[in-house]
Structure formats: structure tokens, C-alpha cells
Image (cartoon, rainbow, N blue to C red):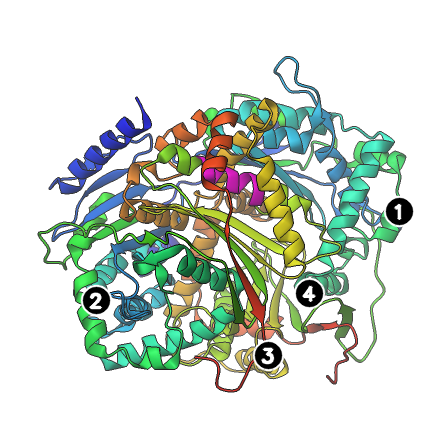
Amino acid sequence: MTARAALVAGLLAVAASLTALTPVRAAMARDIGMGSLPRGGSYIVDPDPTIASAAIGLWFRAPGAGYDNATPGLSNLAATAAAVAPLASGKSLYALVHSLGGQVNIAVYPDIVGIGAVVPASASRRVIAAITAAYFAPSIDDTAVKTARANAAVLGVQQRYQSDQTLHDLLFKQIFASGPAVYPALPTSITQLTSITTAQVRSFAQRAFRSENAVLTLTGNVDASSVSAVTDGSGTGAMDQPYDSTPAPNPAAATVSGAVDGVGLAWIGPPISDQRAATALDFVADYLFRETTGVVWRGLDTAKSDALVLGQFITLHDPGVMVVTIGGDHEKQAEKQVLDTLETMRQPLDKKTFEAAREAFLYHVATDTQTPQQRADNFGWYTVEGNLQYAPGISDGAYNQVARSLDPEYVASVVRRYLDKPIVVDLIAVPAQKGSTP
Amino acid sequence: MRFAALALAIGLIAAVPSPSQDTAAAGGATIVRQADNNASLVGVALVVRAGLDRQTMRQNGLAALVAETILRTPVTQAQNGVPAAALQDAIAAHGGSIRFTVDPSDVRFYVEVLAEDAPAVLDLLRTAIAAPDFSSATVRDARAALVREIAQTQQVALQVGLDMLNAASSGQANAGLPELGTPASLAQIFAPDAKAFYHAYYRRTGMLISAAGRLDAVPNGALEALASALPAGATSPVTVHVASLHGTTREIIAHRDISSPWLIAQYPAPSVESRDFGPMLVLAAFVRRTLSDIAQVPGVVTPTFASRSVGAVYAYDRTPANLVLYVNGGLIGDPSRAFATALSVVNVLAAAKLQGSIEEVKAEAAGDFASDATTLETRTWLAAVFQRESASPDFIERALRAIAATTPDDVQRVARTYLGNPTIALVLPRGTNVQD
């Protein structure tokens, strides 16, 4: 079966299972179940009764800068405000999860939103009820928006000192011409932040966080019967179509002033539907950039430089993006090392090296997807990006099968096809001026 | 059963299968198993009584050198035509990893591997640990690797501080030495020393093998074979008493090539078999939350640099156990003030009973414990610690039960018993002093 045929079969399987009214068993090696939520939307459950905690995720397709792509930060404010707004019990989702010994994580990306909670297993039903109530029936008021604004302001200042995330946003701005990926997830100025009204936040939340636009992911010590805890939602429609962005036809390099130094490199990659090419770029990122074991990582002279090189292929609906960011010091030497190493990857690795690297890659995927939170996040991300069956970390799942099918010649051809000349952003630190922070 | 009923009543305990343990088939070693058929991996912790307390004071770093030598021992893989490779490289090529940690009384190897490769990798580990290569070249490589790692560790201010505090709090002088040694001490240790240490202390009695994950992929007898890779026999620590210090200060100061100061306080703490274990888990959760709240920007709900700049860690897996509070001066405006506040909070806890319900703090303690025990590495290690300290590897049930049974009086008693007089480490950037 070709990758394309496998994709079509996979998509049909997902579509069939997501529209079913009763739980079905997915065609996966693990005991992973999928089905429809009682009032719209879908769920994925991956139980592991041998551990004492559960991870609960709620994922949506939502454009970060609003449906008109004109309000950067709107999705972030809405996601945060819904978490801190009081529920019927008087407690917010955020407060409830903390009172039960758990943690809430709010992740907002240009095209999607993921809300995660890790809780003791005994608290999972209460948190499932609360998280779906908080988002499927948001009761956002001025106080909640005020908290969300304060949160975004602090995160915005903080991000200025994190070259990785800052460069990520700057690179996306260069390589995309239009669509949500052009805009950062956080407002970039106080003016921008305060111009977003409670009505805008509420309206966005009501549209984006509809139950039918959601997938609930349950992993760890939790089972499908917990889905009955969901009592909110009123949807009968379908999940929104993916919010893709359009690559710039002639992207240009940029030099930008910031609070820290850094260099970023980016390349447009394949869509999630091209499983083999996407997996090949995951392999390349792992082989070159993984902490401790990566070829580039090991090649850095830590005695002479504090350069920190991070590289990953970001699997998106269409297209994906390869990003490398370099922070610390001696960034330009590290950049040259990255580019020189990539040049060597245009030729196939020898068989022995490749086979060892592929086994190591498969192991890294498995070890990076072993906790309930990692699994809940993975299932959520890959579902809203368009291909749950391709989520890494499923034993004998599509991802592993594709990874095992990689060969040196194909990987080299993918490098030649996608990782030619990168778009480069130089981030230059300048002394902070009074009032320059958002 | 009364405690179990109480715990279930307040909803802290989840039904989790207990690990199984087996000592009969392992010839003096203990094997603990936690099967998890949902996992893709097999994780195995192998604990040998060959840690810091088996070294003399002049041999600091020898335990680490032997462990590193084992990782670099050439092993031949099963496939024809594949040349010998260092154990760690051979395991990586099979889809796995191996690392080691030197503890006060043990050296712990942790190997993790894709389930289908577990038989081959466990066999490689058995081969290497049964007959390490103590040639000069391999030992020299191991020493060089340790020196590089020590250099990196010296850039981690928290680790520098903990090393100083552990040295100060250790009842045995040798058990409190840096786990990897120092470049100077390693330079005095040679291949014959490593070989002699291995033959003296790598013995089966007291050895513990803790495995978790897809154990159906592990052939019958493979873990027992790992145990029998070492000869029978027990070993004893090298006793090195440390003279009591009579100084007037309990502050230790070090300067390193770091950008900002770190302030660290260490208190003694109960081990897992103590009746004070549960209350200390609750107390540590309370202190952790209070410090985070103090440091956090008011009204902000997402973790920030400020909230991550402080912390409290109850190291119950260490001997002796301790509680550590820390402030990272690089992430917070006034580290001295934050640190003083942290110490004040602890003092107040010792002096006055917590008012109101402690159920939320207990839930937080349970949540922290449960969410920290989700990787195969932590699960194998916690099972080993609980088996060693309390003869039952059922760490989840024991910890959550202990938390559930904790009362406010217990918390105050434990605060008063343990949190009286901390030892404080200040790790400062070079060129600065305490007054700065």
C-alpha cells in the first residue's frame, strides 16, 4: 500500500470512528479507544491502569489571531480566560485542578489550542466535567479577561528573553505570507493587548471552543466510562477545517532587534499527509539536533562555547516547518556547523550508521511518548492537525511503520528537496529602554 | 485496612497493581517487576552496593570510574560481522540507552530499550557487567569522560550547592564526597584500582534489579541471568567517621563561573519507612506551593520565570534523606528576600500548627507524587527505593496511604523535628561576595 493509499484509509477510519455514536476500537496496536462525546466532539482514550495519574487534554482548531487574522493574542486570551472564569461551582477550572493536586497547561499555537491537565487518577472524572464545562460553555467575564491579559503581559516580557520562542515567531513571520502562522501567539505590545475587549474574547471562545470543534484526549489511569462525566456541549456539526497558512513566495532573511542574541533557520516542509517525508525530517532533526546524542550537539565544543542549538520538524496540517534556533554565544560558528552538517546529509548515510540512527530514532520517539501527558498531547496535536493514526508513540502504529521503512537514499532525497537554502533571522540584543516592554 | 479505607474515603488512592518481587530465584539479589503492557519500552534499574561508601577518602571517583568503564566496555553484538562496540554505543544502536548514577551506598545503572530489542540489550549488559574491560585504554577513556562531565556539572549551581550540602550532612565522610570525584582525585586512580574495586564490591548479595514496562518481551530468566552475572557474596562499607564541626556558622560558600547567585538550604528529613514520611511529603508540598506563590507575579496563572525560581525538593531516595529549598537569583529580582521569606515560612511551620483544612495540600502532595512516577525510570527507581527501605516495592500505595493519613498535628510535629536548623549553601558568581 502506498503512503497515499494508507493515508486515505487512515483518514476514512478516523472519520468513521469520530462520527460514530458509540465507542469503537481504533485499528491500533494499543488498547486505544475513540468515539463521540455526548453533546458533540470526539474523544480518544488510551488507558494505562498501572500508573496513578491521568492526563486530560482538550484540543481545538482555532486561529491564533482571530477569525479575521487581525487580533494577535486573541486565542491566547480566550483560552486563559476560560480556564480562570468561575464555573457553576464557583471555582474556576484552574483553581479546581490545583485543589485536586493537579496542574493545568494552556498551549496556544497559530492554528490550534490545547488545554492539558495532569491529575491524580481519582480526580479524573471531576476534571473531565470541569474542563469541558469551562470550554464548551465558557462564562468569560471582565475579571477573567483581566487575569488573562496580566498573564499574557508577563509571558510576553518573559518570551523576549527566550531566543528559541522569539526566533520561532520571527521565522514564521518571514516564511508565511498570510494566515494565522504570520502572527505570534502573544500580543506584542500593551496597546495590542488592551485593545482586545471582553466581548471579542467571549465571542471568539464561543466560536472556537464549541464541542464539535474539540477532541478530548484521556490517557493514564482513566477509562472510556469517564466520558460520561461530560455534560456540556451543544454541537451537532463538525470540527472546523484546518487553519493553514500560505507560504511566502519569496521569503527574505531578516535582522531584528531584541532582548537576547540568536540565530534562527527555517525551511518549509511537507504537510502531515506526506507521512514518509514528514517522518524523514523528524529523523533528520533527531539525528542532528537531539540533546546529547545529536551529531550537531556532540560537535559543539562546550569548553569554548555556550551555544545552544535546538532543531525540530514541526508537523502541521499543511505545510510543516523545519526550525533550527541557536542561542547562547558563538551563534554564527554554530550556524555554520548546522549548515555544513546539513550539506553532508544531502548524500545518503552509510548503511550501518543509518540503521543505528534509525533504531535510536525509534527509541527516542518511544521514550518521549511514555508519560500520560506526552501521550495526551500527542493524540490531541495529531488529531487536530489532521491525522491521529500517524501520531508517534503507538506501538506498531503508522508512524513506527513509516519510520522503519526509511532508507538512506530516501532521507537524503528529502533533505535535498526540503532543506536547501534556509530563511535566516538574526536576533540582535540591544540595551533595554524604559517603557519598551509590553 | 483502616488506613486504606480512610485513604479511599478521601479519594487519593487510585487502583494500581502492586509490583511483584522475587528473591528466591536470584541467588541473593532481589528482582522487582512492574508489568505495563501499554508501554513500548522495557526499563531496568540495576542497583549494586558499590557506591560512595565503598571508597576510601583517597579513592573519590573510583565508583564512578568503574561504572563508566562498564559503559565503555566493548561488547560483540549477535549479528555476524558486526565489530565490537562500547556497551553504551551498542545499546544505542539497538534502540536504547544506558546511564548510571552513583549514590552514597549504591551505584545504579538504568537501561531502557525498545521492547523487541530487550533480549539482546539485556544480554549485552550482562556480558559487560560480568567482565568489564579494565584495559588502560578503556579506563583512560572513562576517566576523560568523567572529567568532561565534572566540568559541565560545575556550571550547574544547584548541583554545586547540593554537593557541598551532602558532604556536610553525610554521616560517613566518604559517602558525602562528589559522586563523580574530582579531576584531581581521578588523576590518581588507575586501571588496577578500578579492577580491584570491581572485584571487591560488584557482588550479588544486596543487588537489586527493578524492571518495568513490556516485561512480556523479556525472556524468562533474563533478569535472573543479569543477577548471576556477579559472583555471590556480600560487601561492607568502608567506615570513615567524620569529626563533628564546631563552627558558629552553618553557611557554605562557593564561587563558580555562573551568571547569578543561588541560595540553597538543606534540612534533614525522614526516610520512606519512617512514620514521618507522609507528613514530610505534605509539608514539602506546602512549602513548595507557598514559595511558588510568594515568587509568582500576582494574578498570573501560567508558570513563569519567577515561580520557577524557587523550589523545595524532598530527597527521600537519598541516604540520609533531606529537604532542600532553593532560590535561583537569576530569575527573581531580590533572591535574598525570597530566601529569607522561605526560611521564615519553614520556621513558622515549626512553631505553629497549620490552621484550617490541609486536604488541598494533601491532594497536592499526592498529585506531585503520582505525576512524578510516570516514566519507566522513575517507576523502577521508586520501586527499588521502597523495596530497599521498607521491604515493599509498592511505592504508590504506600506513599498515597501515608499522605492520606497525615493530620495537621503530624505536619507540625515533623516541622518541629526536622526543620530547626538548616545548613545553607551560597553559590556565587566569581568576583562577588555575600554582601553583594
Q: Label 4 belongs to which residue? A: B157
**Real-space Cα distance between discs 1 and 2?**
64 Å
The answer to the question of whether label 4 and label 1 lie on touching residues, with beta carbons closer than 8 A, is: no
Labels 4 and 3 positioned on one and the same chain: no
Instruction: Find residue A72 and report its image quarter.
Output: bottom left
Determine which quarter of the picture holds residue A141.
bottom left
Residue under numbered circle 2: A205
Q: Which residues are magenta?
A: A280-289
Residue hosting label 3 = A431
> Percent x, y for residue A13?
21, 33
Q: Spatial distance from mark 2 to mark 4, Cα to Cα? A: 43 Å
**Marks 1, 3: nearer the viewer:** 3
- Quarter placement of the C terminus of chain A: bottom left
Q: Label 2: few (<14), some or many (≥20) within 10 Å?
A: many
Residue corresponding to mark 1: B187
Query: Circle 3 sits in a helix, a strand or a loop, which is it?
Result: loop
Queried whether the magenta region covers residue A287, the answer comes back as yes
In front: mark 2 or mark 4? Answer: 2
- The answer to whether residue A416 is seen in the rendering is yes
Mark yes or no: residue B33 visible.
no
